[in-house]
Image (cartoon, rainbow, N blue to C red):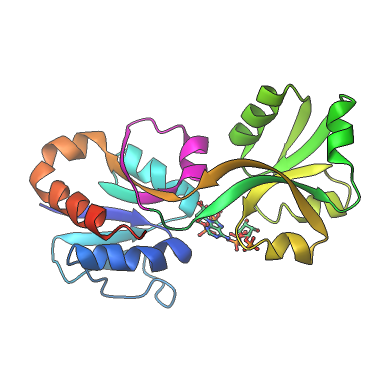
Amino acid sequence: MTLTIALSKGRIFEETLPLLAAAGIVPAEDPESSRKLIIGTNHPDVRLVIVRASDVPTYVQYGAADLGIAGRDVLIEHGGAGLYQPLDLNIAKCKMMVAVQNGFDYDDAVKHGARLKVATKYPKIAREHFAQKGVHVDIIKLYGSMELAPLVGLADAIVDLVSTGGTLRANNLLAVEHILDISSRLVVNQAALKLKYNTIQPVLDAFASAVPA
Ligand SMILES: Nc1ncnc2c1ncn2[C@@H]1O[C@H](COP(=O)(O)OP(=O)(O)OP(=O)(O)O)[C@@H](O)[C@H]1O
Ligand SMILES: O=P(O)(O)OC[C@H]1O[C@H](OP(=O)(O)OP(=O)(O)O)[C@H](O)[C@@H]1O
């Protein structure tokens, strides 16, 4: 029975290679250098489909892929319908933070009930966070490079992923609030798990045994 695994290029693909290896799966090509979107493996019945990170849940939800790996950020924004999420893989770790330009008094703005303009690729997470704090916000949806928004007056604050903090520092920004710890999870199509149980379960077990500390 064919098994299709949805992955994104870059850090998730790189950090998934050891997990695939634990399941005895070795990709036939490197998606960084190949333009192919369907990549075979050493198993004739296992293939990888290479999609945008934020599209992984959609491919798995509709059964176009049986399994996928996606960040918690992406899964929250997607909503998780039709997905079984059995395993935190502890890869692609980072934090979802609120950041502002150095010199912007975030605490004071919050204390005085200012209405904040918040630029983000993660509107659901941002909306929920500020609703919990009781802060009024206008969410400005962006698709990348959120760090630019406060520098050019598009927003007062951003909600974005932070790992080393290097991108914030390079752009004169400061993290002012931690929202969530993020890592990537294995997602499985709920129908596929039942129909292909004998194929999928050993892969889940192998991944579970290889999750980094
Ligand atoms: N700097 C980082 N360090 C560690 N993990 C990260 C970092 N940035 C993002 N991630 C995690 O890795 C996942 C994939 O990130 P990646 O940069 O490959 O895709 P993207 O550019 O965010 O997505 P898309 O292509 O859909 O816009 C993110 O969803 C997040 O969970
Ligand atoms: O704290 P740091 O270690 O600097 O990492 C944070 C950066 O990493 C992510 O971007 P990424 O590198 O994935 O680029 P992208 O926005 O093109 O996806 C994220 O959107 C931040 O900009």
Q: Is residue 114 among the parts visible in the rendering?
A: no
Residue 66 image position (x, y, % from top left):
25, 46
Q: Is residue 187 among the parts visible in the rendering?
A: yes
Q: Residue at x 39, y 65 (%)?
A: 15
Region of the chain picked out in magenta, as a range: 69-89
Magenta region includes residue 190: no
Q: Is residue 64 above or below residue 34?
A: above
Q: Is residue 160 above or below residue 50?
A: above
Residue 16 image position (x, y, % from top left):
35, 63
Q: Residue at x 47, y 65 (%)?
A: 11
Question: Quadrant of the rendered structure where residue 172 is?
Answer: bottom right
Q: Which residue in the rendered view is the most extreme toward the front?
A: 213
- Which is nearer the eye, 72 or 77? 72
Q: Is residue 9 left or right of residue 23?
A: right
Residue 142 image position (x, y, % from top left):
69, 46
Residue 95 image position (x, y, % from top left):
58, 49
Q: Which residue in the rendered view is the most extreme toward the bottom?
A: 33
Magenta region includes residue 79: yes
Question: Quadrant of the rendered structure where residue 169 is?
Answer: bottom right
- Which is nearer the eye, 182 or 14? 182
Q: Quadrant of ligand 2?
A: bottom right
Q: Is residue 89 above or below residue 122?
A: below
Q: Is residue 166 above or below residue 175?
A: below
